[in-house]
């Protein structure tokens, strides 16, 4: 992003359209390219907010150009699948159970430990008494 006062020229055939950004350092609305001043070849001036200009450019851009304009965030996830057991309190007979299968996307952050105690992505460990996680004591 341009952070200083700049005037850019766009040649359109024989006419020149000038774009001016950051023209008033004391006005927060014109700093950080929040507003763009267009100076037409006949001297008329138009002001356009950056967000409106970006939205207009996005709407006329081709699909591959739009993909370049959209911010991308890549995050690894793991789907955790489980079955939840729910005991009804109303509308069904009390004590009726409902089992629901649920898939929850969980972001992979930090070090993941599997049931056998090995690091996800690392070498697998054979189950031994030292690395096996069990609710029962031997």
Image (cartoon, rainbow, N blue to C red):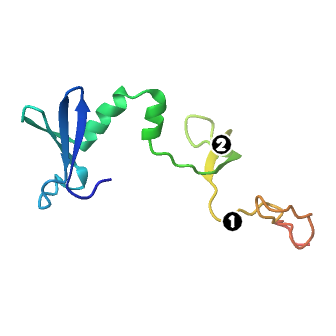
Query: Which residue is rendered at x = 62% and y = 47% of the image?
Result: 105
Pick the residue in front: 29 or 15. Answer: 15
Element at label 2? strand
Q: Residue furthest front?
A: 14
x, y percentage for residue 127? 91, 64
Pick the residue in front: 112 or 12. Answer: 12
Mark 2 or 1, closer to the camera? 1
Tally of numbered discs: 2
Query: Which residue is rendered at x = 45% and y = 45% of the image?
Result: 71
Could you tell whether 83 is left or right of 59 in the image?
right
State if disc 1 and disc 2 touch (CB < 8 Å). no
Q: Which mark is residue 4?
A: none
Q: Is residue 92 above or below residue 131?
A: above
Splitting the image into 4 quarters, where does residue 88 fall?
A: top right
Q: Which mark is residue 111?
A: 1
Query: Which residue is rendered at x = 63% and y = 51% of the image?
Result: 76
Splitting the image into 4 quarters, where does residue 26 fall?
A: bottom left
Query: Which residue is rendered at x = 12% and y = 56% of the image?
Result: 24
Q: Is residue 137 visible?
A: yes
Could you tell whether 71 is left or right of 45 in the image?
right
x, y percentage for residue 7? 20, 48
Q: Is residue 97 visible?
A: no
Give the quadrant of the C terminus: bottom right
Pick the residue in front: 3 or 103. Answer: 3
Mark 2–mark 1 distance (CA, rounded to whole Å): 21 Å
Residue that mark 2 sits on = 103
Q: Is residue 31 above or below residue 111?
A: above
Badge 1: how crowded within 10 Å, few (<14), some, or many (20+)?
Answer: few
x, y percentage for residue 35? 19, 46
Pick the residue in front: 15 or 51. Answer: 15
Badge 2: how crowded within 10 Å, few (<14), some, or many (20+)?
Answer: few
């Amino acid at each position: 992003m341009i952070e200083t006062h700049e005037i850019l020229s766009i040649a359109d055939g024989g006419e020149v359209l000038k774009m001016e950004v950051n023209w008033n350092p004391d006005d927060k609305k014109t700093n950080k390219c929040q507003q763009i001043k267009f100076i037409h070849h006949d001297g008329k001036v138009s002001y356009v907010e950056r967000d409106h200009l970006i939205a207009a450019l996005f709407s006329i851009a081709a699909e591959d150009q739009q993909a370049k304009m959209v911010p991308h965030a890549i995050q690894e996830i793991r789907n955790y699948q489980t079955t939840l057991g729910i005991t009804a309190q109303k509308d069904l007979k009390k004590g009726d159970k409902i089992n629901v299968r649920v898939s929850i996307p969980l972001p992979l952050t930090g070090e993941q430990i599997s049931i056998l105690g090995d690091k996800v992505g690392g070498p697998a460990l054979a189950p031994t008494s030292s690395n096996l996680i069990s609710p029962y004591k031997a």
